[in-house]
Amino acid sequence: MQIIKKIGLFIFLIGLTIFTVLPFMGDFKVTPAALDQIIQEKGISSELFIQRIQEDVVGQEFHGMLSLSPQITQILEATNAQHRKEKEYKKIIYTAAHDMAAAVGKVSGNGFIVENKGLMWFLTFGLGILGSLLFIVPNIVLLGKKGIKNNGIYHENATNRGWIAWMVFVFLVSFYLVLYFRSEYAVNWTYLVDPISEFLSGNPAGHWFVYGFMYCTVMSVMAVRMYIKYRHNIYQTVRTTSVLFFQIVFAFLIPEIMVRLQMPYYDFKNAFPLDYDFFFQWNLKSLLNSGGIGLFILVWGIALTLVIVPVMVYFFGKRWYCSWVCGCGGLAETLGDPYRQHSSKSLFSWKVERWLVHGVLVFAVVMTVMTLYSFFTGSGTVLGLKTQTVQNTYSLLIGAFFAGVIGTGFYPIFGNRVWCRFGCPLAAYLGFVQRFKSRFRITTNGGQCISCGNCSTYCEQGIDVRAYAQKGENIIRSSCVGCGICSAVCPRGVLKLENGPLKGRINPTEILLGNDVDLMDLVNKK
Amino acid sequence: MEHIVIIGNGISGITAARHIRKLSDKKITIISAESEYFFSRTALMYVYMGHMKFEHTQPYENWFWKKNRLDLVNGYVSKVDTANKTLILKSTKEIKYDKLIIATGSKPNKFGWPGQDLKGVQGLYSKQDLELLEANAPNNKVCKRAVIVGGGLIGIELAEMLKSRDIPVTFLVRESSFWNGVLPEGESQMINEHILEHHIDLKLDTNLKEIISDENGWAKAVVTDKGETIPCTVVGLTAGVSPNIDFLKGSGIETGKGVKVNNFLETNIVDVYAIGDCAEQHEAIGNRRPVEAVWYTGRMMGEVLAQTICGNKRAYNPGHWFNSAKFLDIEYQTYGWVFSEKSKKDQEQHFHWRHSKEKICVTIAFNKDTKQFLGINTFGIRMRHEILDRWLTEKRSLDYVMEYLKDANFDPEFYAQYEEDIVSHYNALYSANITPRKKSWKRIFSNV
């Protein structure tokens, strides 16, 4: 079994290596036809740009996007500068330089990778999946009898912030930086999944499609790991299935199929304010221009946030969303599960958390109010602040850095719910409802807690569960996502997730169960 | 300001300190030689197994003590001078007290076995024991085999720990079946099976005769009373614990097995109290033992004594017995009294149900004359403490317990429920006709 695991790891690493070197590979040659296509798609009216591309780029062989991309970005920036100087504002190209490079790259790739998409898919994704499964599946035998087997987590390099964890950290952060800021280097990756994208939506793949496909793949493979690790725990099995279903069907397949049917791309489970650009002008316009379905999405999106979310949280706690439906939660619960023990439980972290997560919520709401104000009045500024600037700042700081680079990249070091805990505005909103008006709580079982600390250690949200359990107090915290692991790892059966009556949900205890005291006497003495 | 000095920073001492601080402004000093900060010794096993780091076993952050003005002194108390209300530390430092709380816990039992002090022979109780085990048995190259002597809770935990590092384990149990001095037959049998399934070499009815030394003073084998010699590198002595009170000799504080205390946890010397594992009740409370080395009772004594010291004199009055443990992968909970065949009284009868395939079982003890519910043991099913505590107080009948059993279930959501099966087994056995009631929040929270 150990040998199979080792072979699996080896195969996985081959796949990962090929995937990782792809951005540096490939041949690119911009043909006149491809250039025409770009000019048309992007509506380029700058003769200067076209001319310089024709001179410096068209017909030449480039090896790797690393050599092609700087040419494009340079020319674009230089021509834009020229046009600005000469006040030819209509000729300025508003497509961002790196997006332009990605677009040009996408239509000009040729050679082995482009001609062997299927084979290349197998050598990257295929080997990755195969290797991971060979690594994971033997655990059915190796983990032995059913039961929580966290053995050795703090002895393993990969799960105890050793060098492997740091390598994963560097890889993930780099991947997200490429994805968000240098998408042109992802061009070769897009070829791998072109056939899938064309099958689903009829369009060639962009870098976000690569990400979406990869997200589903990683989640599926790591869900297998969850199924095996928690195979005796039905709550975990059902929850993993649910979160996997919503990711693959709602976040990935439905939006792509909608595009195929000439409808707007939309993820029906993505609620505002997590879906922060729902009220952005371009989105509202696109929805309003899409007829019946656009209107439906508009109404659904608003109802989801204002009605469905609070009602569901009242009945089931915020877990119905955060660990049963949400994609961010889904990745955290599958890919992130091996790192869940790293979330800091210190009081300091809790203070930071409350300021940050609520700060982001306020930021998101203020931005949205500004956006709507701009939408209805047509004014680009609110109280002297440019709406567009605020939107861009939010997209960059929160959407790209916090949710992506930090949110996922920091898994191996800061635990798997960095984003959910410190940054997600929807989590903050759900948290308010959960804290003040929800039937959900984690019940602690009388006086049975032995303060061992398994619950706190494995709480991904950094809640010091033990602090409550050893006092016999139910856990009512806005940050709890109801993953159920505290209950699973408790060796004494002290914790249980429950949706019970609202009354008596918060139960500060004077004396723990076990000491027989006359409670009325105690109350009267106060 | 009154100076309260606590010897021992385990659950009893720390609980007392915390509650005294909650209730008063007294000066509090806590002395310990074991560790700088309070930790949960129940979790030491998880540190060795790699589930946690030692820091995780500390329930309070390091700044907590200073903030709450709990002075921590690292030291070993070698003498208590009750006449001058002074403690003399090994470092010859002296500490004056106004009130003294002895909360020094236990130490592993040694019964004078030949070779019990050899290198490689150890108990598992303190932080130092854990560090020793890490040195003695870091992996299965250094420790080729371990022998564990004593079939109790610490023994099986130690076996689980060593197995987590693939170290072969032989487990010597004096009794004819694991822990059958405490567990009824069926349960004890089930745990035997479970131990064997984990490839632990369980030897029942076997006593340790001697531990043999190699030329360097290390344990190299144990000899059993069956004449068997088992080569090993580590010997775990886990035949229970006894109060850690040797330093009290000559202090005038009355001791028996432990420090003798009355219901108010007072010793024979004014202003000296004892709580936790090291305290011994003059008269056992109910069916409890005079010395109770249990986490919860230590905590409860701490809570009670804090009240007394802060002017709200209260007797230690533990309610219904409860406890829990984990045998490898099987969780065990008990509420009320379920005695083993060895110690049960004539009128105590048991209803036992065991799952046909899984390692899950329930034993309910009742009075065979009155049918009163006396206690319940569950393996692989979690039960709700409040509900069972209430039923015991209300002296419910066995029929009532069966009918409302679903209210007591505390298993996670979506778990298979066994109440129907249990009740139908009960009906068949006692020709009863009970239909289990649906779980009701109203009943569960009727006391809130």
Image (tube, coloured by chain):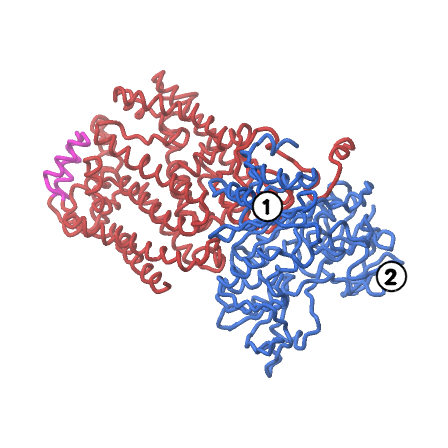
Residue at the image position 57 percent from the left and 32 percent from the top: B441
Mark 1, other Cα within 10 Å: few <14 / some 14–19 / many ≥20: many
Where is residue A127 shown, x and y percent of the image?
Answer: 27, 55
Q: Are marks 1 and 2 on the same chain?
A: no
Where is residue B226 shown, x and y percent of the image?
Answer: 60, 76
Mark 2, other Cα within 10 Å: few <14 / some 14–19 / many ≥20: few
B178 sits left or right of A126 in the view: right
In the displayed structure, B251 sits above or below B297; it is below
Colour used to depict chain B in the structure image: blue
Write down which chain is painted red. Answer: A
Residue in front for this viewpoint, B238 or B393? B393
Could you tell me which secondary element the residue under label 2 belongs to?
loop
Pointer 1 with pointer 2, Cβ within 8 A: no
Q: Residue furthest right?
A: B83
Amino acid beneath label 1: Arg
Where is residue B71 shown, x and y percent of the image?
Answer: 73, 51
Q: Residue furthest front?
A: B431
Could you tell me which secondary element the residue under label 1 belongs to?
helix
Residue B448 in view in this figure: no
